[in-house]
Amino acid sequence: MGIIKKFRIKSFKNKNSLIEFENISLSYGNRLILDNINFKINESEIFGMLGPNGVGKSTIFNLITGLIAPQTGKIKINGEVINDYPIYLRTKKYKIGYVPQYGGFFEDLSLLDNLKAIAEIVIDNKNLMKNKIDYMITKFELENVKDIKAKYLSGGQKKKLVIALALLGDPKVLLLDECFAALDILTIKMIQEIIVNLQQENQITICICDHQARDLLACVDVAMILSNCKIIAQGSPSNLINDTNAQRAYFGNSFKIS
Ligand SMILES: Nc1ncnc2c1ncn2[C@@H]1O[C@H](COP(=O)(O)OP(=O)(O)O)[C@@H](O)[C@H]1O
Ligand SMILES: [Mg+2]
C-alpha cells in the first residue's frame, strides 16, 4: 500500500468531535441495516468507513445529510442533536459538502457550465463566483476539458468535477462516497492527494468510504470497519490491519501493507 499521507494525526484527544453517532439503529422494513452503532468524527480529521457492498456505508452518509432518519439514537453535529433538522438546514448551518458515488453533475452541461450553475446557487458575489470557478479549474487541472459536456468526461475528470462542485460552497465537512471506485491507479492517487491537501490547506473534516481497504487506508487518519450491521473495529490504519476481528471479518489473512 503506497502511503499518501506524509503524516497522520496521532491523537485527537484535544480535538472537538464534529459528527457523532450515538446508539444509531436503522432498518429498512424489517431488515436491520445498522444495529446500535457509535462513532465520532473529529474536526479536521480524515475519517474512513470500510465494509463490504451493502453493509450500510451510503446509508450512514444519508443519515448525516438528513435524507433518511434513524429509528433510534442521536446524530450530533458540533454537539447539537440534529435528528430533526431538515437537509437544507444541516447543509447550510454546518457547511456540509457531499460527493455521491454516482452522478452529482448535469450530464448535458459543459464542465464550466456545471460549475457556473452551482456557483450561482452557493456564491452571492459575481466576482467571487468567477474567481472561485477559475480557481477550481486550475486546481483540478481541468482547463482543457472545461467546454466538454460533462457526460463525455473520463471517470477521473467527472470525479474531479463533482468534488469541485462540492467545494464551491467552502464546506467545512466533505463526505465522499466510494470516491475511488472504478478509477485507474493514477487517478486514484490524484484523488488521494486532493483529499490530503484539502485537509492540510483548508482544515476540512473529511469522511470517505470504500468497499476496498487499500486505497482508503492510504489516505485516512482513522477508520472504522462495518460488518453485519455493527462496527467491528475502529482505529488508525496500522491498528486496523493488525486487529484480529477486522482480519477475520474483513481483511482476510493475506492483506498486507507493502
Ligand atoms: N431505500 C432503501 N430501501 C430498502 N433497502 C435499502 C434502501 N437503501 C439501501 N437499502 C439496503 O440497505 C443496505 C445498505 O445499503 P448501502 O448503505 O447503500 O450499502 P453500501 O453503501 O455499504 O454498499 C443494502 O442492503 C441495501 O440494499
Ligand atoms: Mg454505497
Image (tube, helix red, strand yellow):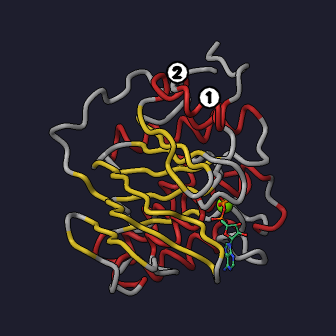
Q: Which amino acid type corresponds to the residue marked 1 in the rendered image? A: Gln
In what element is the residue under mark 1? helix
Disc 2 residue type (three-letter) = Asn
Location of residue 147 with respect to 244 vertically, above or below? below
Toward the viewer: 200 or 208? 208
Q: Which residue is mark 2?
A: 242
User: Which quadrant: the N terminus?
Assistant: top right
Looking at the image, which residue is at 57% across and 68% down?
59
Q: Nearer the viewer, residue 96 or 10?
A: 10
Q: Position of residue 159 (x, y in %)?
A: 67, 55
Instruction: From the top left corner, tell me how far across and down residue 167 is, in percent.
Output: 46, 61
Residue 67 in the image: state x and y as whole percent.
51, 80
For label 2, being within 8 Å of ligand 1 is answered no
Of mark 2 and mark 1, the one earlier in the sequence is: 2
Mark 2 is surrounded, within 10 Å at the Cα level, by few (under 14), some (14 to 19) or many (20 or more) other residues, namely few
Q: Residue furthest front?
A: 30
Residue, disc 1: 247
Q: Residue at x 73, y 48 (%)?
A: 181
Q: Residue furthest right?
A: 152
